[in-house]
Amino acid sequence: MASAPIKIQNFVANLPLFREIAQSEMERILHDLSAAGLIVVRGRRIGIPNVQRLRTYEP
């Protein structure tokens, strides 16, 4: 993993989208990003293997 892991709370706090949605919706989005290989969730931490790929991701 190229980037340092960050806490999920910090990841979510920096994304305006997540401030407006319910907890269950946030969990689904995190699951989808993980399934797409865009993030790696380990406990309370999230790793972003390829930041550029995550930035350009369109569901």
Image: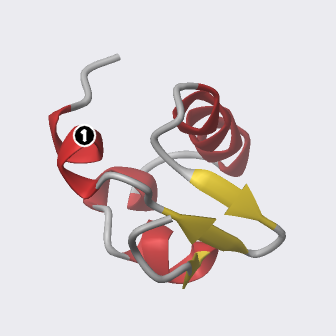
Residue at (51%, 64%) from the top-left corner? 1
Residue density around tag 1, few if under 14, some if 14–19, many if 20 or more, within 10 Å: few
Number of numbered discs on residues: 1
Question: Based on the displayed image, in which of its 4 quarters is residue 44 positioned?
Answer: bottom right
Residue at image coords 52%, 49%: 39
Q: Quadrant of the C terminus?
A: top left
Question: For the residue marked with disc 1, what is the amino acid?
Answer: Arg
List x then y, in percent, for residue 33: 52, 35
Side of 24 where 50 appears, left or right? left
| Position of residue 14 measured from the top left corner of the image (x, y, whole percent) | 32, 74
Q: Nearer the viewer, residue 3 or 12?
A: 3
Residue 25, percent from left and from top = 62, 36
Instruction: List the residue tagged with mark 1.
Output: 53
The residue located at (33%, 50%) in the rendering is 17
Q: Is residue 33 left or right of residue 25?
A: left
The x, y position of residue 32, in whole percent, is 59, 28
Where 41 falls versus 33 (above or below)?
A: below
- Quadrant in the picture for residue 42: bottom right
Secondary structure of the residue carrying tag 1 is helix
Q: Nearer the viewer, residue 3 or 18?
A: 3
Give the residue at the far front of this rendering: 2
The extreme right residue here reads 43
Out of 28 and 50, give the one closest to the viewer: 50
52 versus 31 height, above or below: below
- Residue lying at 46% horizontally and 72% vertically, measured from the top left: 11
